Amino acid sequence: MRDESRILAQYLRQKGLKQTSQRETVLRLFLEAPKHITVDELTARVRQVDRKVGTSTVYRCLKLFTECGLALESKFQHGRACFEHGYKATPHHHLICTRCGRIDEFENPLIEAVADKICREGDFRSEEARLEIYGLCAACQGPKASRAEE
């Protein structure tokens, strides 16, 4: 967390903002949280430590974290913003369960190679690429033996 704290402190100085104990608490709990956490989920964790911190404070902190590269924001099909760690994050994609909301990450060099080829052929410089696959996770599908044949 030392690198992340340093990055945030430097960014806040550049923006003329102060480092506060509330921001430090939100950052620590964000970094300890599971991947893909919503503002409401993080607020609940923060309020266990500091009851005075509200949803708007957590949202503003996550916005700062996103601006300085400590967080990545995704808005999946369900519409809620989810945040994940952005510092030293590697390119990855998501499998999203439409029933329970579970989000799993995966990496696949073949997908990256196809995206690179498409960009080269289209004389396009990619800044970001995301693949989201929606369906049912194994738990929501039920036991393999009882699933309909595909």
Image (tube, grey):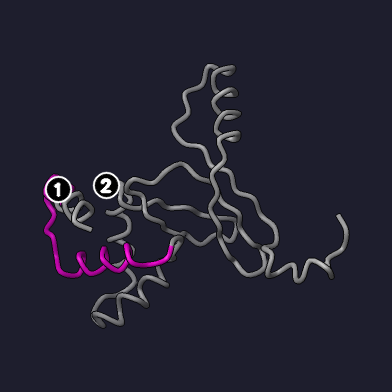
* For residue 77, side relative to residue 71 (left or right): right
- SS for callout 1: helix
| Location of residue 63 with respect to 43 vertically, above or below | above
Give x and y (percent) for residue 108.
57, 40
Disc 2 and disc 1 in contact, CB within 8 angstroms? yes
- Residue under numbered circle 2: 68
Residue at 24% x, 80% y: name it: 50
> Is 24 inside the magenta-drawn segment?
yes
Q: Amino acid at mark 1?
A: Gln
Q: Quadrant of the N terminus?
A: bottom left
Neighbours of disc 1 within 10 Å: few (<14), some (14-19), many (20+): some
Q: Quadrant of residue 24?
A: bottom left
Q: Is residue 24 above or below residue 110?
A: below
Q: Which residue reaches farthest front?
A: 145
Q: Which residue is mark 1?
A: 10
Please give the range of residues in magenta.
10-34
User: Which of disc 1 and disc 2 is earlier in sequence?
Assistant: 1
